[in-house]
Amino acid sequence: MPQSSVGLSQATEDYLKAIYGLAGDQERAVQTTDLAGALAISPASVSGMLRRLSKDGLLSHLPYRGVRLTATGRRLALRVVRRHRILECYLTNRLGYDWNAVHAEAERLEHAVSDELVERMALVLGDPPYDPHGAPIPTRDGEIAVPSLIPLAEVPIGTLAELRMVDDKDAERLRYLTSLGLEVGTRFEVVDRQPFDGPVTIGLPGRPPVALGLALARTLGCRIHEPEPRSPPEDSLPAGA
Amino acid sequence: MPQSSVGLSQATEDYLKAIYGLAGDQERAVQTTDLAGALAISPASVSGMLRRLSKDGLLSHLPYRGVRLTATGRRLALRVVRRHRILECYLTNRLGYDWNAVHAEAERLEHAVSDELVERMALVLGDPPYDPHGAPIPTRDGEIAVPSLIPLAEVPIGTLAELRMVDDKDAERLRYLTSLGLEVGTRFEVVDRQPFDGPVTIGLPGRPPVALGLALARTLGCRIHEPEPRSPPEDSLPAGA
DNA sequence: ATCATCTATTAGGCAAGCCTAATTTCGTCA
DNA sequence: TGACGAAATTAGGCTTGCCTAATAGATGAT
Ligand SMILES: [Mn+2]
Ligand SMILES: [Mn+2]
Ligand SMILES: [Mn+2]
Ligand SMILES: [Mn+2]
């Protein structure tokens, strides 16, 4: 069972990390089905594993109600997240990886590196606060500063914004963003948003405007640079939490 | 099963590597017991695993006669060895690890790194020919140049020699060698050898002579710098293969 | 040749994780 | 209230690797 360097199995670490990821940073109970989807494992198998993790005190499981990490579970999850993200930084900064290739590599390495190695990497990198996709890196002692970002899908027309965070699971998508000139830190203007789940069109300096599908636009975390536009588009909702 | 990056299980990779290590570089069949000892696994379990590896075409198993790697098995074993040794180099040269700490780390990482990552590390390092303990690193295409070294235990008195290779499994032993001023490349003179499995005494420039136990002396691979001493000691044997 | 002693294999079991199929529970809507 | 569909759990199985105990093969000494 202890094939990782902290005595947890690879499966356990991936479960904890996935639960943490699905629960936001706190609170919210995670459904069996969602977890099964995230891990590409059958719901029945997840049920079984949750019982075990619960027995080990890593999460609390109200049957038919979902799971919630315990303090211990959350701490261990954040440890894995830190490893994963430090690794991604190291691979891009020191070994010439593209941002679209690091996730798969880190997904395996996160279970094999020791704390010692992770901290040496962090030291060499100067304790980076964000990974190459803009995700915040938990500190050694398990703190994490979740940036409050707005999905591109909800940025009002006319706004000047900056791309701050991208979901890293799909390498293809990251390559696509690169081809558009979009990376973490890129500034752009939202020039159009079509209703009925239509695309979002953005303009980057020196490039023709591009229309992005709503599904993609929902996964792009942005920081607003220019506040309210003059006339708010009719399909905009009040900014939900 | 495919939890490594080449589709082999961690267990399989460790078995292949251990068999390769015990067989020298060729030929010699490996006994179940020796393998069990090297892997710290019961002989019964090893028997079972050998049947599986044999069925998968990685080795040939004559029951009660030991095993021998097939060409495929040897190729895969060398791939793991290359990973392991490149990793050890990278950890010492780029991340400030001491030579006594790298083995344990590499033992886990060797199953998680991709070929891509290993080759990037090798590139950054300039394709090192030896790992930090002096062991030769197989090339990408599975060739390995086994250096012909003489165990310190067999170096004649009066000879000037150089430490070229050290077994890396025991961190404590490596720390001990460091404390004596011995590392790969260190030159010294053999000043005494006691019969009846007695210790070997060596002299390093600027240090008082040190007597080393025979068991240790047998694991230190040396290159001779000065040939025949004047009077060969009476307990010396003709240099065996 | 025979026995004692290793060495190796087989027999029987177990835990971790995964799967599919069957069943139960939840929640919602008529 | 009752029934239906979705979500979750349970039942039953499988593979990988590992273990201990029991058996069988190889070997050297008598
Ligand atoms: Mn990632
Ligand atoms: Mn993972
Ligand atoms: Mn090593
Ligand atoms: Mn290993």
Image (cartoon, coloured by chain):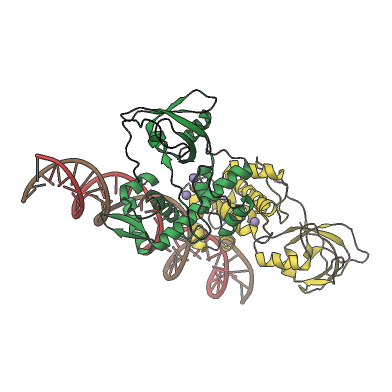
Chain colours: A green, B yellow, C red, D brown
- Counting from the top left corner in percent of width and height, residue B13 is at 55, 51
Is A201 situated above or below B200?
A: above
Q: Single out the residue that lies furthest toward the front.
A: A230
Query: What residue do we see at 90% from left, 60% from top?
Result: B228
- Which quadrant: the C terminus of chain B? bottom right
- Counting from the top left corner in percent of width and height, residue B15 is at 56, 54
Query: What residue do we see at 64% from left, 52% from top?
Result: A124
> Image check: D11 left or right of B135?
left
> Image check: B189 left or right of D16?
right
Is B172 situated above or below C27?
A: below
- Residue B112 in view, yes or no: no
Pick the front one: A33 or A72? A72
Tell me the quadrant of ligand 3: bottom right
Total tally of numbered discs in the picture: 0
Pick the front one: A17 or A124? A124
Residue A212: which quarter of the image? top left
- Counting from the top left corner in percent of width and height, residue B155 is at 82, 63
Residue B14: which quarter of the image? bottom right
Q: Single out the residue that lies furthest toward the right.
A: B230
Residue A155: which quarter of the image? top left
Pick the front one: A93 or A26? A26
> Image check: A186 left or right of A31?
right
Pick the front one: A154 or B233? A154
- Residue A115 in view, yes or no: yes
- Counting from the top left corner in percent of width and height, residue C8 is at 53, 60
